[in-house]
Amino acid sequence: MTEPLLGQLSRLGLTNDEARCYVTLVDRGGLTAGQLCSATGVTRGRIYDVVRGLLRKGVALETATSVRRFEPIPPPVAVTNLLERRHSENEEVERSAQQVIESLQTSAATGEVPQNLLEVIRHRATLRQRCRQLERAAAEEILFFVRDLGQVAGDLIEESAALRRGVRLRALYESSLLSTPYVETMKSFLAGGGEGRHVPRLPTRVTVIDQRVTMLPLHEATLAARAFTVLVIHHAGMSVLAASAFERIWADAARIPFRAARKAAAGGTDPLDERKRTEAIGWQGHTAR
């Protein structure tokens, strides 16, 4: 199994584990999940997520037998399926991007940015207050790209309240955070009903609220940073674009390995509320603040 081949499959839309499993299926024919684990080194806790990815992306089939076995789709068909899927995703992103361009061009033609389109925030106190307001107004879903410790210090009070209102909260974390003290906040978030997955690297820190508001920091945050700028963009096209990127990364991300996280809430104590007294430096909860 050559690394260049795995890299080529990754560029077509497979994760590294999916590419490794697909090449193994092509080489060996139908295999069970356990046999795939043994042949590829993918863990048993991860293998079914990988297999579901192969099925969803049209490069493998599950055989209808008493034992679950997975067969490879022939390479010419599999590659065509991957190309069509990537083309469809790119078209969706391009449509959203065009909406953003048209809106901004209209703004430029009039010589001004509509008052309700863009907020520029440069003070931490203002940012904390605005984040609370936006999260309290959320009605459907909040998406978080959680990239580094410069972003994630603080409590989860508003996130907890949103979950109790029935708002869906999903967070994508950089895998490096799993080995930091912030892992306890992740556990609390999941225990309270939030959903989380992790990936080796995220492109930036973003928060998307109800696919109508996007919060985008324009700095590389650190815990000691003083100066910063955050844009709050009230533009549905931009939010759809960011949400589309989130969904693409989410589909291939690994699940957070906290099996007992939700059990922590069984005793009647809201684990998110236990962090209310946590002191923040200005980036509260998950939001890009």
Image (cartoon, helix red, strand yellow):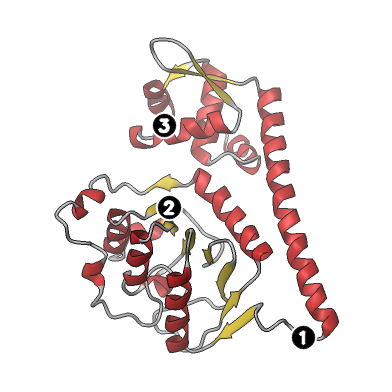
- Residue most extreme to the right: 109
Which mark is in front, 1 or 2?
A: 1
Q: Is residue 125 left or right of residue 244?
A: left
Task: Name the mark on residue 48.
Answer: 3
User: Foreground: 220 or 95?
Assistant: 95
Residue under the image location 52 percent in, 84 percent down: 228
User: Upstream in the sequence, badge 1 or badge 3?
Assistant: 3
Which residue is disc 1 drawn over? 112
Q: Residues within 10 Å of mark 1 (few under 14, many from 20)?
A: few
Q: Residues within 10 Å of mark 3 (few under 14, many from 20)?
A: some
In the rendering, at what x and y percent does residue 163 appear?
Answer: 36, 60
User: Upstream in the sequence, badge 1 or badge 2?
Assistant: 1
Amino acid type at mark 1: Glu
Q: Is residue 122 above or below residue 222?
A: below
Q: Secondary structure at mark 3?
A: helix
User: Upstream in the sequence, badge 3 or badge 2?
Assistant: 3
Amino acid type at mark 2: His
Q: Is residue 17 visible?
A: yes
Q: Is residue 133 left or right of residue 103?
A: left
Amino acid type at mark 3: Tyr
Q: Is residue 259 above or below residue 122?
A: above
Q: Is residue 35 left or right of residue 23?
A: left
Q: Secondary structure at mark 1?
A: loop
Q: How many marks?
A: 3
Task: Name the mark on residue 198.
Answer: 2
User: Foreground: 47 or 99?
Assistant: 99
Separation of marks 1 and 2 at Cα, in angstroms: 39 Å
In the rendering, at what x and y percent does residue 133 appear?
Answer: 45, 77
Q: Quadrant of residue 203?
A: bottom right
Q: Is residue 80 above or below residue 267?
A: above
Q: Quadrant of residue 35?
A: top left
